[in-house]
Amino acid sequence: MTITITAFERSPDGGKGLARDTRVRWALEEMGQPYEVRFLSSAGMAAPEHLAIHPFGQIPTYEDGSLSLFETGSIVFHLAERHAGLLPTERDARARAITWMFAALNTVEPPVFELTNARVFEADKPWSEARLPLVKDRVRARLDRLSAHLGVADWLDGAFSAGDLLMVSVLLRLRMSGILDEYQDLAAYVARGEARPAYARAFAAQFAVNAPSL
Ligand code: GTB
């Protein structure tokens, strides 16, 4: 049975790999799992067939035989549980890697997400410019701590894990704002993630669909 995921027919980021299907593609590539992609328009995302597997009508989803999943973190965790390569086998190290998955999505991504909203979706609001410094400082508060934790290590806790996959994916969303470059160690951490062949394959696959047309 081939794994099928869903992705935007046309990602709003124009191929930068920032939509969440790239995270699932990356996990699948790390594990060498073949997969297919069902591309959805906004009408397709609101269609009853899609709502049956994603109650909120979003992407990505994951289907493998009788199992359907939504939520990127859950999908990456499911894959990491079933295939070698993204979670350590030693019990405590595994628990810590899972903790970093939650930290990426629950502690670091919310202010990063707010910054995207402020810079992109709320840029035309009269209060947007006044709010931006506050939103940026919330991001920096997280990055200060993350940078202190990472120190001179390559990855968050020992070998590369699903925690790093999600953290790098979240931090990638900061690049356009310039904030990532304020943290040389975190910029280098993100670059290490991007240098992984599995990431390159995932990025190329989504870029082939979303690259801006000339
Ligand atoms: N919690 C869910 C998960 O982790 O899977 C959130 C899923 C989600 O927000 N999916 C988005 C979606 O389907 C796709 S990523 N949106 C349509 C909708 O909600 O109706 C969207 C995205 C693309 C690019 C950027 N970016 O450039 O920063 C940010 C978000």
Image: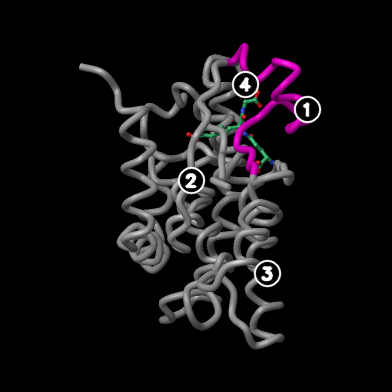
Secondary element type, mark 2: strand
In this figure, which residue is indicated by the disc labeled 1? 52
Q: Is residue 62 magenta?
A: yes
Q: Residue at x 66, y 67 (%)?
A: 81
Which disc number belongs to residue 210?
A: none
CA distance for labels 1 and 4: 38 Å
Image height of 11 relative to 42, above or below: below
In this figure, which residue is indicated by the disc labeled 4? 127
Marks 1 and 4 in Cβ contact (< 8 Å): no
Secondary element type, mark 3: helix
Percent from the top left, x then y, of residue 165?
51, 60
**Image-quadrant location for residue 208:** top left
How many numbered markers are drawn?
4
At label 2, which amino acid type do we have?
Tyr
At label 3, which amino acid type do we have?
Ile
Q: What is the span of residues highlighted in magenta in the rendered image?
A: 42-63
Give the mark nearest the N terminus, 2 or 3.
Answer: 2
Which disc number belongs to residue 98?
A: 3
Badge 2 density bin: few <14, some 14–19, many ≥20, Cα 10 Å: some
Q: Residue at x 31, y 43 (%)?
A: 204
Image height of 83 relative to 125, above or below: below
CA distance for labels 2 and 3: 24 Å
**Which image quarter holds the C terminus?**
top left
In this figure, which residue is indicated by the disc labeled 2? 35
Badge 1 density bin: few <14, some 14–19, many ≥20, Cα 10 Å: few
CA distance for labels 3 and 1: 28 Å
